[in-house]
Image (cartoon, rainbow, N blue to C red):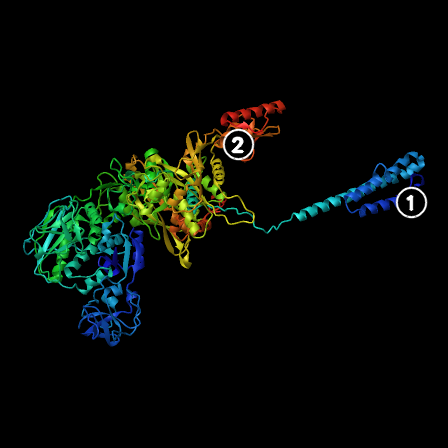
Amino acid sequence: MDAAVNATTISATNVEALERDLIARIDASADDAALEAVRVEALGKQGVVSGLMRTLGQMSPDERQVMGPKLNRLRDLVAEAIAVRKAAFAEAALEAKLRAEAVDVTLPAPRAYQGAIHPISRVMEEMALIFGEMGFTLEEGPDIETDFNNFTALNFPEKHPARDMHDTFFFHPGADGARKLLRTHTSPVQVRTMLKQRPPIRMICQGRTYRKDSDATHTPMFHQTEGLVIDEKTTMADLKGVLMAFVKAYFEVDTVEVRFRPHFFPFTEPSAEMDVRCDRSGGQIRIGQGDDWLEILGCGMVHPNVIRNCGLDPEKYQGYAFGMGVDRLAGLKYGMPDLRDYFAADVRWLRHYGFSPYLLPGLAQGIAS
Amino acid sequence: MKFTLSWLKDHLQTDASIDRLVDAMTMAGLEVEEIHDPAAKLAPFTIARIVSAAKHPNADKLQVCQVETKDGMREIVCGAPNARAGLVTAYAAIGTKIPGSGITLEARPVRGVVSNGMLCSGAELEVDADAEGILELDPGLAVGSPVAEALGLSDPVIDFEVTPNRPDWLGVAGIARDLAAAGLGKFIAKPPPRLKGAFASPIGVATQDESACPLFAARMIRGLKNGPSPAWLQRRLRAIGLRPRNILVDVTNFFSYDRARPLHVYDADKLHGAVRARLGRAGESFAALDGKTYEVTPEMCVIADDARVLGLGGVMGGEYSGCSDATTTVLIESAYFDALRTFQTGRATGINSDARYRNERGIDPQSCVPELDRAAQMILDLCGGEVSEIIVAGRAPAPPAPIVFDPDRVRTLAGMSVKPARVKQILKALGFAAAPEAGSKRLIVTPPTWRRDVEGPADLVEEIARIEGYDKVPAADPPRAEGYRAPPAGVGESRLRIARRALAAMGYLEAVTWSFCERRHAALFGGGADALVLANPISADLDCMRPSALPNLIRAAQKNADRGHGDARLFEAGPAYFGDGEADQARAIAVVWRPAPKRHWRPAPAPDLFDMKRDCLALLESLGAPIASLQHADADQPWQRPGRAGGLRLGPKIIARFGEVHPTTLAGLDAAGPVLAFEILVDALPAPRAKPTRAKPPLEMSDFMPLTRDFAFVVDETVAAGDLVRAAFGAERPLITDVALFDVYRGAGLPAGKKSLAIEVTIEPRERTLTDADIDLIGKKVVAAVVKATGAALRA
């Protein structure tokens, strides 16, 4: 401490010199310890600034008027400079610590697995959504069926060649001699629904179906979506309207040209197949326009025998039914070229053609978004 | 069914282009599959005549022919046994590509003699299956003229799908009738000839089982001269892929396609006694025209004479009584066979003949006699001879019953308006008789005998709609949703959808695999019961309904690994089959992880069963299962590795299983491990309670800070940690809100056979701040409950 600076010789000039000296030493302090030493010398109980503050009491009021504010300012300045210096030390220390703890952020993160929903599930949900919007409920039934539900009720004559069209998987006959089978279409669910519900009926059914067939365009297991409406006045015009609305919603096109062709199914009369316009040029099929036709589903007015076989009066009730192959329609929409890949569970295929769980199908924003 | 344009024009007077005809066929229900112009492929092939044929100097089976061709005289080496001087056949010049073999001809020596071209067989030109010899064509053909024309293949061939309800479309005349009705021209009706028999047939016919063969008609022609058919007939048959043989056989084939009328011809000189249709007898067999011998069963309808079985009625004739060029007396059979029996016989023997195809679909029984006469007349015209009186056994079944039909039904069922006059016009054009019902607007409609598929008003509506055009049916606006509707999908289906989303979000890939698997694999998962084994599987390794999707997924994971894509995380949300009863099919979610993580600079613990348990519980929670009420269950499935797997139950009901897959199971699946898996039985989850309102119950939030207390217990090694946690959790309800097990310790400081389990108990005060005394009391209750449940000692 400069001996010249003491309580008796205090003056404004001295205070300024003291301030310069202390601030310079604070700024020059190299670490917390040095800073603390300055603080004790200046502001500690025995410190020079504290000592000067004590002299105020002995001053005349006039002197005090002059020196009071000066000394107070000196004390505040020094205290603030120390705090600033201290904060700078803390910041530097933290910075050094963080720098020391730095890692290479380009190192790879642990793996997060990406899942996906199978296109078949996706497409069945889309279909259920579209028909649900048109008032169809979703009914269910087992894959292992009786001959009655799969064939007889649906007006397939006993052992008729028409049954040959469905290469059926059978189980061994049971104790009662009857043999169960794997349903060749989801139509048994229509039968079950008619047997348990009174009209009006407005339902779809979806699920696994089976035919003993395996080549490039057939797999022994495949999927169908079928629909059934039974009431007292539904006509083929209603069928046409619903299916045209479905095709537009499913393929997400504003307009689509369709064609209904006569066909034969034992369970409908009149029966039809529905074609949509498509363009096959360029190796890929585009739906909705073009100069070609693509068959996409079968349909018709429910055969009176079927209505009767299901316990309803065909004189009173009528309606329509339709059925479509989910696997093929999924391929048409989403571009899966080979049906056999659907069931191979190859992770590359599942990742490529699968759907994010966060993209929910919805009618408002476009069914596939 | 194939036919040619010129053949159609025998029955349809029309100027319509082929495109219009084909379009009209499709829109009338005759779905055209292909239009084939065979002339294109055969363009390079021309007619040639063999002038001389000499034995090849260096080969026994070859001949060196001098051939007159469009390119002048050519020396051609030919291996066909029928190559001979004077034969008119098909010639291919050097540079031609042969359709049957795909080979392009080069001039090169064959055993030392250069062949300057090739003489072709039917197989080489792909016009028939005959590879034995070169084509034998009409000697009158001009050398150099197109082979396509000579074979009648310049005529476009139309191939279309005949639906099983329309056997009348298996004849060209039937197709023409529908096209005429659809407005494409005029149907050319051709009344059958009036044949006067010159003698009574010395061979009688009989039908001994009228259910199998209701009607059997025949005529004999004697003094005929059989031989190759005229060019026009050969062309027709070749055009649709049939090989001409001789007039008698070709005439039967012609009428099979022209009139959907199968006929059969017997060489009458080879018959012994009357020809009878009867049921087969055990032990009988016969050699069919296809060269094979078939065992006859009592279910089959056979045609037999006194000496032998001559053929399978309606399916195929026999070799013995077949007609050859030497035949001079023929018995022509025109019969009506029961369709179902024909189908069954065809199926049992595996014979797929044109006759079976027609008879099993049900031909027009009324056509037996007129078409027999038409065929007899053609044979007389082509072969000469004289025809016997007709002999008929049995009788045709009753014609289709009349239908009372209200023309307005077209509107009320098909939704299209068609005037009654037009209705009548269409029916008439299709061969239906329509008379007004007395005193009503309805019609009495009688279907023609060839339309036995028409049974009621709905069938008539289809006829009218089809001919008028389905495009005339308007499209009604689809209904719009109004008001509230119940959710379209049931709880089970909705839960599968949730599960798919949840698992995909957890990083699992959804697979869809077969509902079947190999029986021995099913057995590894508790399945494989007799009732679930397919009688006719597509292959031996897909012969049993799966008791779980796990075997399929584990095998798929292994296949992926074999392809270099390990670390597969797969799931399937679909059916599992526990029996063949209605309720034996369950919705199940199967999840498989075959971990093979790549090495990482920051190693993670190896995936184990607890990863499965975590995901299983997370999924159960997503599905709305009451997680707090779940209890552990022992592993109860053979696929679960002992000591590394378990189950979760609600009361006594198992709802999920998780853990490592048993090494023996993996070995049985030819898969390498370890494989982790879990399975949730969705149908075993309780249904959500029906609630009167969508509003959720009020949220209860305590204003008081939760606090925690730690406890460490020493227990026997055999004590299940889950029991300890459960006991602690239940010690003071509802204040204890969580029990976290944070340490498992064995070793120094503990006796052998003991372990220490440390838990952190969270206590959430509800009504007031808890005093130290309160908390001590809760602690004591925890200790008491744990001690009681597990025999634990509080660790000092």
Q: Are marks 2 and 1 on the same chain?
A: no
**Height in image: B640 above or below B95?**
above
Q: Amino acid at mark 2?
A: Pro
Instruction: Kindly tell me whether residue A235 is visible in this rendering.
Output: no
**Height in image: A156 above or below B12?**
above
Nearer to us in this view, B102 or B178: B102
Q: At which x and y percent is residue B582?
A: 33, 35
Mark 2 → mark 1, Cα distance in angstroms: 82 Å
Quarter of the figure with residue B585: top left
In the picture provided, is B687 more to the left or to the right than A230? right
Q: At which x and y percent is residue B590?
A: 42, 41
Is the N terminus of chain B in the top left, top right, bottom left or bottom right quadrant? bottom left
Mark 2 residue element: loop
Q: At which x and y percent is residue B478?
A: 41, 42
Q: Amino acid at mark 1?
A: Thr
* Chain where mark 1 sits: A
Mark 1 residue element: helix
Is the C terminus of chain B in the top left, top right, bottom left or bottom right quadrant? top right
Residue located beneath label 2 in the image: B751
Nearest to viewer (mark 2 / mark 1): 2
Instruction: Kindly tell me whether residue B750 is visible in this rendering.
Output: yes
Residue located beneath label 1 in the image: A13
